[in-house]
Amino acid sequence: MTTPAIIARPASPRGVAALEKRSVRPAEAAELLGICRDTVYVLMRAGRLRSVKAGRARLIPVTAIEEFLTSEEGMA
């Protein structure tokens, strides 16, 4: 009798199973949007890109990036 194979998620460098990111930092958001980091901060201050404060970090939900892209698509 053979034991079934265990399918594992890829491990992160720390050995913890990788989870799908639900938020990104401004630099990562800038990379995803193809704009500079300063523009991300301008969009957040203007209320066009939703973000949350977690301690000293500013996090942008991935859904906020999708909403921003959808709203900008309608304006174009």
Image: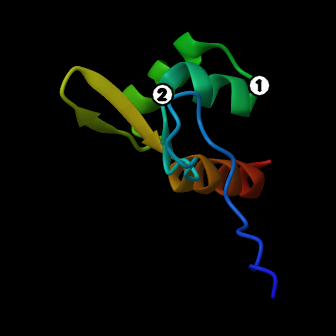
Residue 64 shows in the view: yes
Q: Which residue is pictured at 68% across the width and 60% down the height?
A: 8
Extreme residue toward the left, this view: 55
5 left or right, relative to 8: right
The x and y percentages for residue 7 are 73, 66
Say which residue appears at 39% left-offset and 35% top-offset: 59
Q: Position of residue 76 (x, y in %)?
A: 80, 47
**In the drawing, does residue 68 fall left or right of residue 56?**
right
Q: Nearer the viewer, residue 52 or 21?
A: 21
Residue, disc 2: 25
Q: Residue at x 74, y 79 (%)?
A: 3
In this view of the protein, which residue sits in the foreground, 40 or 15?
15
Residue 46 in view: no
Q: Residue at x 57, y 18 (%)?
A: 39
- According to the picture, the residue beneath numbered tag 1 turns out to be 34
- Left or right: 76 with respect to 25? right
Q: Is residue 35 above or below residue 44?
A: above
**In this orientation, which residue lies closer to the viewer: 56 or 15?**
15
Q: Earlier in the sequence, mark 1 or mark 2?
A: 2
Amino acid on which the number 2 mark rests in the picture: Arg
